[in-house]
Amino acid sequence: MNFENILVHRKNNLAQITINRPKKLNALNKATINELSLAFKELEDDNSIKVIILTGSGEKAFVAGADISEFAHFTVDEGRGLARIGQELLFDYVENLSTPVIAAVNGFALGGGLELAMCCHFRVASDNAKMGLPEVSLGVIPGYGGTQRLPQLVGKGKAMEMIMSAGMISAKEAKECGLVNQVTTQEELLSVVEKIAGKIVSNSSVAISAAIRAINASFEDGVNGFDVEIEEFGECFGTKDFNEGTTAFLNKTKPSFRN
Ligand code: COA
């Protein structure tokens, strides 16, 4: 599929999506959100893709937020629709993908940009990255899941401070508070992320998607994550990957997962 605002590149079992509006610091306009949603769906449906890496084009920004020029004149109903459609189409969708998604945060990740990084399964940042949810400085609040996912990752107090102050934190601070897993130089960012992805690729995709569902269940309202874990654990015993993994271990060989 051809896209105007994003680039999709496949390499072996990995896919990289690059948000490609560098002149606008990769701000998320409606078209970009639609294209991202389509690209994620296409990659999720492609069994050869085991890990998706999401990054921004240029050296300055991952994504500097939702495109302010598009919503500056919205009404209350339009504002509500913007958040609801965005969450359903992209942010919740990515969080619940069965293919692991890693955000390679290569610069500013602000507002909708940080919300996008946060809905990925985990994040690695370059040392120039700056992260924050500055929405209250615009008279609005985060609408793409930021008020929910930031406290999950950094704790309620730190999330309150970041959202209320509208400030930015450095990559180093983001690592200290658990927002990103690792910090690298900008030059090494993608190779470091690809190295982590390489480790994921060698494991059972079927088991990894079960793990994503079980982990996500602990953050769902009215769902008992331990029960989901029991179910998902049990289901694994009926898969070819389980047979392959345990047989290989007992035979002291390397498993070859067919998923
Ligand atoms: N929406 C729309 N356009 C944006 C944008 C956004 N969220 N963030 C940056 N841009 C555009 C700027 O308008 C500018 O466009 P122009 O050259 O046509 O005027 C271009 O990207 C470059 O941004 P600029 O502000 O000139 O870069 P800078 O280095 O001076 O500042 C930031 C960088 C990230 C600090 C600044 O762009 C910023 O504060 N952006 C908005 C962040 C925000 O509030 N995000 C949350 C939105 S809900």
Image (cartoon, grey):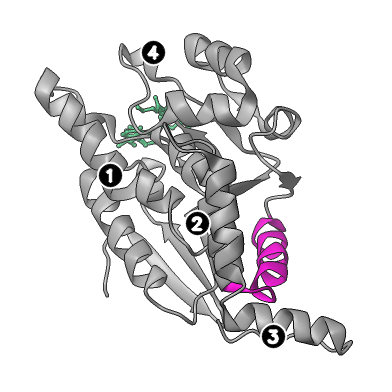
Q: Which mark is residue 155?
A: none
Q: Which residue is mark 4?
A: 136
Q: Earlier in the sequence, mark 2 or mark 4?
A: 2
Tag 1: Cα neighbours inside 10 Å, few (<14), some, or many (≥20)? Answer: few
Q: Nearer the viewer, residue 23 or 35?
A: 35
At a point 59% along the width and 51% down the height, the residue shown is: 229
Please tell me in which quarter of the rendered image ligand 1 is found: top left
Q: Tell me which amino acid carries mark 4.
A: Val
- Which residue is tagged 1? 88
User: How far across and down, in percent of the image, does residue 44 sit?
Assistant: 40, 69
- First-in-chain label (3 vs 4): 4
- Residue 24 rendering spot, x and y as whole percentages: 35, 42
From the viewer's perspective, tell me whether residue 191 is left or right of residue 229: right
Kind of residue indicated by mark 2:
Leu
Q: Which residue is mark 3?
A: 244
Amino acid identity at mark 3: Glu
**What residue type is disc 1 on?**
Glu
